[in-house]
């Protein structure tokens, strides 16, 4: 007869197996892993160290751009040892399959003024640069003590406007990526790595090809 403790363990194990099985369904849509968990951890460690050094003794505010950068922000914060606050902005981004234009809509603004504060924008990926170009212009007008950008990913080949980025996690080729916060049609954000989707996923989806 199984003890109560053993039964609890079995229930837990079954739940974990179910989650793993569902995760595999998402994994199957990924053609290849571009950046794995170990690479992410290592690079975040380095970025955290650079930020610690740069902002020691300063009033640091991390501004994350929703929703893609939430996983990056959460992990990056754990590598930042100095005191800091966080705040969020949301902009209209790629609707599924629609490329970002120069026009950016603010869906959520910051909760507090940023005058005289050291603001570090935390972004998931810079593609055309349009979103960040607009955001930095808007935030600079509020007179922060400094305004910098840390982005997890950069696709330099796709740049349409010049953007000065203080720290980049990884420069990547011109491919549409998902995982670690990044989505295709709001899916795949929970993959713990950065991957490239199989082309047939776009072909099957009403959302279409995100690079067109
Ligand atoms: P930009 O204004 O063209 O620089 O667009 C930046 C935004 O587009 C990012 O913050 C993402 O939300 C989205 N984006 C660009 N490339 C990708 C990608 O490869 N995968 C997922 N989202 C992307
Ligand atoms: Mg984004």
Image (tube, helix red, strand yellow):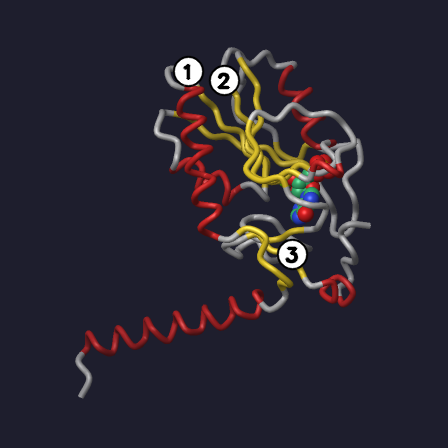
Task: Say whether residue 34 is left or right of residue 130.
Answer: left
Mark pair 1, 2: CA separation: 7 Å
Residue drawn at x 69%, y 20% as measured from the top left = 137
Q: Is residue 148 above or below residue 205?
A: above
Mark number, residue 196: 3
Residue topped by disc 1: 58
Figure quadrant of residue 64 = top right
Rate crowding at label 1 as few (under 14), some (14 to 19) or many (20 or more) other CA atoms within 10 Å: some
For mark 2, give the secondary structure: strand
Q: Judge: label 2 CB < 8 Å from ligand 2.
A: no
Residue drawn at x 57%, y 22% as measured from the top left = 148
Taking the view exactly as shown, the residue that stands out farthest to the right is: 212
Residue topped by disc 2: 118
Of 169 and 3, nearer the camera is: 169
Q: Is residue 45 above or below residue 207?
A: above
Task: Say whether residue 42 is left or right of residue 126.
Answer: left
For mark 1, give the secondary structure: loop
The image position of residue 133, as x and y in percent, is 71, 26
The image position of residue 171, as x and y in percent, is 62, 39
Q: Quadrant of the N terminus?
A: bottom left
Rate crowding at label 3 as few (under 14), some (14 to 19) or many (20 or more) other CA atoms within 10 Å: some
For marks 1 and 2, the one nearer the N-term is 1
Q: Nearer the viewer, mark 3 or mark 1?
A: 3
The image position of residue 157, as x and y in percent, is 74, 38
- Check whether the beta carbons of the residues at disc 1 and disc 2 lie within 8 A of each other: yes
Q: Judge: label 3 CB < 8 Å from ligand 1.
A: no
Of 123 and 185, nearer the camera is: 123
Mark pair 2, 3: CA separation: 35 Å
Q: Nearer the viewer, mark 2 or mark 3?
A: 3
Mark number, residue 104: none
């Amino acid at each position: 007869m199984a003890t109560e403790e053993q039964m609890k363990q079995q229930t837990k194990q079954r739940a974990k197996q179910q989650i793993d099985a569902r995760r595999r369904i998402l994994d199957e849509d990924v053609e290849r892993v571009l950046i794995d968990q170990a690479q992410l951890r290592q690079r975040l460690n380095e970025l955290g160290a650079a930020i610690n050094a740069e902002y020691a003794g300063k009033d640091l505010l991390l501004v994350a751009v929703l929703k893609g950068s939430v996983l990056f922000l959460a992990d990056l914060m754990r590598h930042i040892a100095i005191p800091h606050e966080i705040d969020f902005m949301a902009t209209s981004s790629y609707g599924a399959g629609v490329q970002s234009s120069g026009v950016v809509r603010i869906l959520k603004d910051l909760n507090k003024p940023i005058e005289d504060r050291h603001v570090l924008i935390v972004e998931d990926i810079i593609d055309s640069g349009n979103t960040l170009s607009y955001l930095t212009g808007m935030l600079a007008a509020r007179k922060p003590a400094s305004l910098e950008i840390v982005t997890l990913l950069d696709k330099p080949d796709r740049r349409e406007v010049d953007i000065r980025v203080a720290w980049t996690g990884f420069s990547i080729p011109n491919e549409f990526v998902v995982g670690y916060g990044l989505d295709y049609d709001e899916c795949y954000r929970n993959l713990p790595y950065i991957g490239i989707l199989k082309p047939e996923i776009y072909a099957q989806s009403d959302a279409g090809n995100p690079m067109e």
